[in-house]
Amino acid sequence: MSFTFAPATREQARARIALEGPSGSGKTFTALTLATSMATRVALIDTERGSASKYAAGTSGSGFTFDTLQMSKYDPRDLVGALAAAGQAGYSAVIVDSLSHFWMGTGGMLELVDAIGKRGGGGGNFGGWKEARPFERAMIEALLAYPGHVIVTMRTKSEWVIEEDSRGKKQVRKVGTKAEQREGLEYEFDIVGDLDQENTLVITKSRCPELSGAVINRPGADMAATVLGWLQDGTEVPDVAALLAEAVADKLTVEGALALHSKAQRHRLLGAAILHPVTEAPTTFGDYITERGRALRASGARPPQAGPVGSVQPLRTAPLAGEQKVDEHAAALDELRAAALQAGIAPTLDASFASSYGVAPAEASIEQLREMTELLQGAAA
């Protein structure tokens, strides 16, 4: 492997914001205030029994304009599907209120790990985490690769503290402590802040220099403008919708599919959740372009060859040197995809494989592909 450094290039980006706080700190209100100030169309994934709809615009005209999707079970794979649907519908911002449910709610990570560990051959708690972790990684990848702004709220465990006010009078105040979420999840976001009962936001992490260490009472349009100014200071980046349009085009070749895969990888869009153009099932752009490339290779699709106008290029039936090896690798990759589909982990296969072997399936050796295939076939048996 060669290691080549290149000049760093700042690119335009979308917001990745996490708001933490106890009940009553205004997480939903703040998320809607920021999102509607930054985007024209806002979708809110509601895990709080429809409570966000209380902030919708009423007959008086006051309130927020947004669309909502209510969820009652919180399997991380379902959030990937919801994000894929939001992206295809063209929402320029999505709020997950709250992300904590996909950790500790009904069907969330903790319950998923427990259920996997208890089933026959599940391997107990260790086996449960090993199998469920790729689902969580795929969910995080889908959040980070969403083609719009993302704001998540996270509950914090509440504690009551006794403090003295400016006049020396003791008072009881509710404060949030640790977020109800996986340890270290905050590192995935560009801006993280803690909200208190007075709806004051304390920025605890920020890649935006203007917000580093800021304390903002009732954060709103001013904060949104600061974030937007920072995000837009860079070169334009491709949109996953544009990449998908190229991927489904009839004129796409094997080489074109490889180039699209590389382009998406450079811009960290392989994990972007999309709806499969044919089946409409949730998948990732990385999985779809890999599937498309295999189909093109199987059909013998090749770019046009240079030649005299009107000439017909003969089809080559005999493989060139090295093509037999490529075909063998493609067959092993197809077997792995089929085993993953049977085992029910097709959407998270790439993340799981990379976690185990350090490379994507398309870059792995035939031996690694066959080893993982045997493991999946055994798990599905």
Image (cartoon, grey):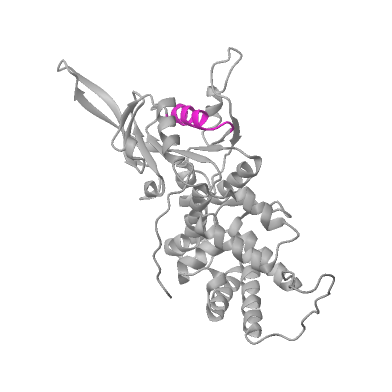
Residue 45 to residue 249: above or below = above
Query: What secondary structure is the magenta-colored segment mainly?
Result: helix
> Going by the image, does 303 lie left or right of 134?
right
Residue 334: give x, y in percent of width and height.
65, 72
Residue under the point 49% across and 28% down: 37
Q: Residue furthest front?
A: 308
State the quadrant of the C terminus.
bottom right
* Residue 279 higher or lower than 160, as above or below: below
| Range covered by the magenta-colored residues | 27-41
Q: Farthest residue toward the left? A: 168
Residue 65 within the segment the image draws in magenta: no
Judge whether residue 36 is colored magenta: yes
Q: Foreground: 21 or 215?
A: 215
Q: Position of residue 132 (x, y in %)?
A: 49, 58
Q: Position of residue 130 (x, y in %)?
A: 46, 63
At 66% from the left and 80% from the top, the residue drawn is 327
Does residue 345 appear anywhere in the picture? no
Q: Quadrant of residue 341?
A: bottom right
